[in-house]
Amino acid sequence: MLEWSTDEELFALMRTELSTCPVSDVMEQLGFLHPMLPPEIRPVRSDLVLVGRAMPVQDEPPVPYGVPVRFDAKPFGLLFESIDALRPNEVYIASGGPIHAARFGEFLSMRALALGAAGAVINGSIRDAGRVLELGLPVFAQGTYAYGLQRRHNVVDYRCSIRIGEVRVRPGDLIFGDGDGVCVIPHEAEREIIPKAVAKNRLERSVREEILAGRSLADAYAKYAVM
């Protein structure tokens, strides 16, 4: 059975041995009905891989008050505090507020990198996409859009439980993203899920080799029962 003593060992194992496909398959087999975040959440570049611990962030639209156009007295709410709260190997994962507003960009990426963050997952848009890519921080989002944050959303809480689509994300859950999407692995189940996913991935390598050697898909499936 696969074992690891530290997150660094676990993350290295996942990068070497896994993709989100076998992880998602195994989670569904184990009864997790929604292992993946919504398919609209994609890497800003298809070859990016993200592995880390969730640091969830809750956004909400600003609350208007007064006339004619006044909003919450503190611009962006707890946005800056939420970024500064990041710890090494954590994933800034945010939801809530309007989807089209860009709630992550160059400056936030710079600060996240300086703090050792693993990356970011935004249930919405980002901006400064070219600069974010140059910085090298793995970022997943619904797209890119120039509209900024102010008057469109505020961070109201962080290091809290959030919901993205049908998936509950809690502090410390394992976040795994690649070109096929983002998987959320509950912390308490990762020692059951990861070894089974690695075993499935190794079986898939055998299937791949047999197909390359000329075996039919039906025969390969009959032999290995994976696809």
Image (tube, grey):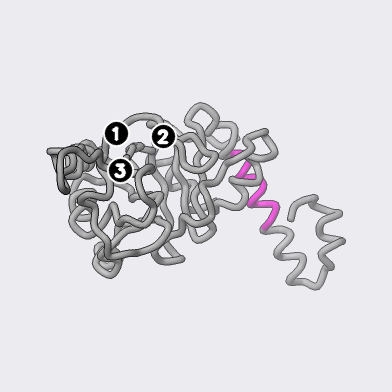
Which circle, 2 or 3, is nearer the viewer? 3
First in sequence, mark 2 or 3: give its number.
3
Q: Which residue type carries mark 3? A: Pro
Q: Which residue is mark 1?
A: 158
Please identify the quarter of the rendering in which residue 79 is found.
top left
Circles 1 and 3, Cβ within 8 Å, touching? The answer is no
Residue 23 on image: x %, y %? 59, 45
Find the distance from the CA under tag 2 to the CA under tag 3.
15 Å
Residue 111 on image: x %, y %? 18, 50
Find the distance from the CA under tag 2 to the CA under tag 1.
9 Å
Say which of 163 and 6 sits in front: 163
Residue at left 40%, top 56%?
141
Give the numbered dot on residue 162.
2
Query: Bounds of the magenta span?
Result: 195-204
Task: Give the overall secondary structure of the magenta segment.
Answer: helix
Say which of 191 and 110 sits in front: 110
Residue 198 on image: x %, y %? 60, 46
How many other residues sit within 10 Å of disc 3, few (<14), some (14-19) or many (≥20)? some
Residue at left 30%, top 56%?
102
Give the numbered dot on residue 61.
3
Under tag 2, what secondary structure? strand
Q: Is residue 199 rendered magenta in the image?
A: yes
Q: Which residue type carries mark 1? A: Tyr
Q: Is residue 98 rendered magenta in the image?
A: no
